[in-house]
Image (cartoon, helix red, strand yellow):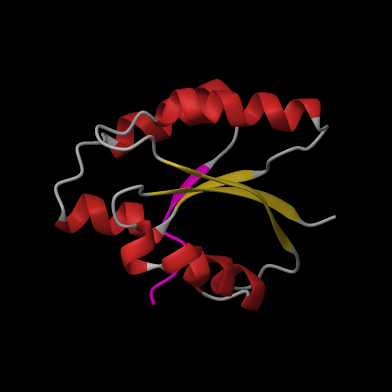
Amino acid sequence: MGKRIGIIYCEKIQDTSCVGCAKCYKAVNEKTFAFEGEEDVEIVFKTGCGDCPGLVLPKLQLQMLVLEKLDVKVDEIYFATCIKKAHGIMNCPMNLEGITAKIEEVFKVPVKLGTHDY
């Protein structure tokens, strides 16, 4: 079994920059960018950030509860490239370092920033 991942996208720009997360799916399916060298990657969920100011923890708690009920595990969580862009050029108010540490602490899953460079 390969790596099972979840993707958190920016609710403000997701359908402006990466309509339907097509760029994330392309990177995962073709094993490029953040997924280069991976043998098998499966997206088990994608969810929004909770909109500004980034209420991602309550959304992730619900997501993880659903996955637990479905007996699905998550190996890594990615903040999609749209989150990276929102933070870098749109003054996203989310404290990425703080929320990354909190997600890793609460859910015991590594968190990475960025999925592709399209």
Q: For this view, does 34 lie left or right of residue 54?
A: right
Residue 79: horizontal and vertical position, in percent? 43, 49
Q: Quadrant of the N terminus?
A: bottom right
Magenta segment includes 99: no
The x and y percentages for residue 31 are 62, 74
The secondary structure making up most of the magenta span is loop
Residue 70 horizontal side relative to residue 101, left or right: right
Relative to 18, does residue 77 appear above or below in the rendering? above
Q: Is 71 situated above or below 46?
A: above
Front one among 20 and 115? 20
Q: Residue at x 35, y 47 (%)?
A: 11
Q: Nearer the viewer, residue 107 or 11?
A: 11
Residue 111, how many percent across, how many down? 49, 42
Is residue 84 left or right of 26 when viewed as pictured? left
Where, quadrant-wise, is the C terminus in this rendering?
bottom left
- 15 or 42, nearer to the observer: 15
Q: Which residue lies at the image location 78% right of the left edge and 37% below the top edge?
A: 72
What residue appears at the point 65 percent right and 73 percent down from the top-left corner?
A: 29
In this rendering, is residue 41 above or below 105? below
Where is residue 95? Give x, y as percent: 26, 34
Q: Which residues are magenta?
A: 111-118
Q: Is residue 113 magenta?
A: yes
Q: How many marks?
A: 0
On screen, residue 8 versus residue 42, left or right, reads: left
Name the residue located 57 percent from the left edge and 74 percent from the top edge: 26
